[in-house]
Image (cartoon, rainbow, N blue to C red):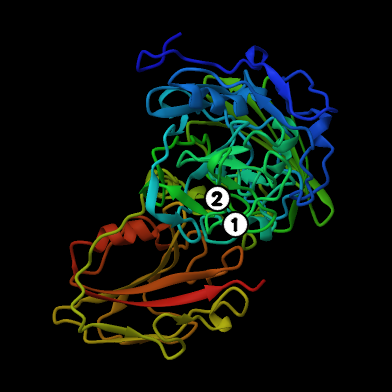
Amino acid sequence: MRNRGGNHVWHTKPELRAIFLLFVCFTVSNVSAHFIGDPTHDQLPLRYAKNVTPPTNVVVFRAKSGVNNHAWQIGDAFAPFAPHVKTHFDEKWFFVESDGLPAHNMMVGITAWQQQVPLPQSYFGDNAWRFPLAPVPAAQPRMIKGNFLSGAIAIAVNGAPIFNPQNNRGEVSAQIGELDQWGGHCGRADDYHYHAAPLHLQKVVGPALPIAYALDGYAIYGLLEPNGAAPLHLDSCNGHTTPALGYHYHASLEYPYINGGFHAEVVEADGQVDPQPRAQGVRPALQPLRGAEIVSFTNSVDRKSFSLGYTVNNRPGGVNYTNTGGGQWTFQFLNTDGTTRANTYSARQGRPGEGVPPQQRANGNRPHPRERSGPQQRQQLDSSSPPLNFTAKHSGSFLLTSSAVTNGGALPQEFNGDGAGISPPVEWKGAPAGTKSFVVVMDHLAPGNEMKCYWTMWDIPATTTNLPKNVRNIGRLGGSFRGRIGYEPPHSQGPGLKTYTIHVYAVSATPQFAQSPSAVTRDDLLNAIKDTVLDSAELKVTYTRPE
């Protein structure tokens, strides 16, 4: 076979490697792939295993001769997972192909569940993982804390990507119940990935080989050096240089769990390392299911049928899903109230919230906006569609303030989801001449480029200069991103500071809509006023969900 550049394509074949013993007493078992359902992995203790002890056996593979010696050595780490994981290289890059699903079980132990499930991904061909064969040390390391919150920062030797230990909201996933007992979970595209070092892989590859490679090209080893010694003098990236290995990273039991930064040069684009593969979902992302704990997960050997079990308040529920061919997946939702529902999804079609009874959705029984029909609303909530933004005139003379909170200050409990959840008081001054009415929008750009709207009001009379708290009988009200009519109090999942922006627009014409006010979304409203805005002002407020 030949790769895209005409060079030899190598798929890992461990039986072709000679193995040398560095210690007198140890045995080497036949290298083979480990499949989901293998009790070697399935019978691990719940939660991310922080007590993993690396094996004492040291295995060194024979070095290959020639200019591609380093590439062959890298391939040795991925060899135990062939043929599920395939590798090849050219003059610059080392490529890793897989469907993204690890050989061990998944999802069990998660207590903060976003309702995603593992689906095979197409990390093949031009969409394969890659990292440079010759890392170039950076003049200044790029730290990952607060950075690179989207996409992966490393690829594990079993073909599963490793993301920043912080999720895309900036919270450490391992500390808030988001991870299973292997250190992973699923993203919005139903893509499985780790947020902590997959230390269990040490038992498969041995301590002499890395458990992952950072996307800057440097190897990530386990807790110890290949000779069993503790790593010394680790830098801020959790790495160091030794005569035997050169520069490399080490995993850890606490933050950052993996490489704390990039010692070599990387390119950052849209908050992630570039280039890297793109995960492809078949259904829109759902809302978190509060109180759920995942208790079981199984799948068929061909990775076409899956079953996930969970409980909410000790009541069982589940999701069964099957690949029915042609890019379609049939989902059967087994709800905790005893009802069931089935849906078929294909290439991002479907409706979030389907199969989940209203009482289990976030914030009670409010319908999701997509459950109101209309192609424009479906496009707005598709995670692949960018949020609508436009640059409104902002003179600085038109001002928005609040008697309850200063600009950038914490929103008092009375106005968020931990309290009464009523709308805060706001007032404005300096409206330009020609103002016919005012429009108010409150929104928050969530990670993943998802715009969430908490308040839409329009047809506010030009004579109005303020909205009292818990405002009533002024203007018209649209729906929030969860479907609530009127003000939706911030009550975001997980700890960490979130910022919400209240906008007020002075417009020269009151917007008109064919649909009922309750069906008007943020994007509908902004589209209607973008050519009539005379001036705008904003007030930023913050909210931190209690631990």
Which x, y percent locates residue 491? 57, 69
Mark found first going from the N terminus, 1 or 2: 1
Question: Which amino acid does the dot numbered 2 rest on?
Answer: His
User: Between 98 and 346, which is closer to the camera in this rendering?
Assistant: 98
Q: Secondary structure at mark 1?
A: loop
Q: Secondary structure at mark 2?
A: strand
The quadrant the C terminus occupies is bottom right
| Left or right of residue 520: residue 81 | right
| Left or right of residue 39: residue 448 | left
Query: From what the image shows, is residue 508 above or below residue 445?
Result: below
Q: Are marks 1 and 2 in contact (CB under 8 Å)?
A: yes
Q: Which mark is residue 6?
A: none
Q: Residue at x 64, y 40 (%)?
A: 117
Q: Which mark is residue 240?
A: 2
Q: Residue at x 63, y 20 (%)?
A: 82
**Residue reaching furthest to the top:** 1
Q: Which mark is residue 233?
A: 1
Quarter of the view holding residue 514: bottom left
Question: Which amino acid does the dot numbered 1 rest on?
Answer: His
Distance of mark 1 from mark 2, alpha carbons? Answer: 7 Å
Can see residue 266? no
Which x, y percent locates residue 467? 39, 84
Which x, y percent locates residue 391? 23, 63
Which x, y percent locates residue 524? 33, 57
Total tally of numbered discs in the picture = 2
Quarter of the view holding residue 54: top right
**Residue reaching furthest to the bottom:** 403
Q: Residues within 10 Å of mark 2 (few under 14, many from 20)?
A: some
Can see residue 131? yes
Query: From what the image shows, is residue 532 above or below residue 210?
Result: below
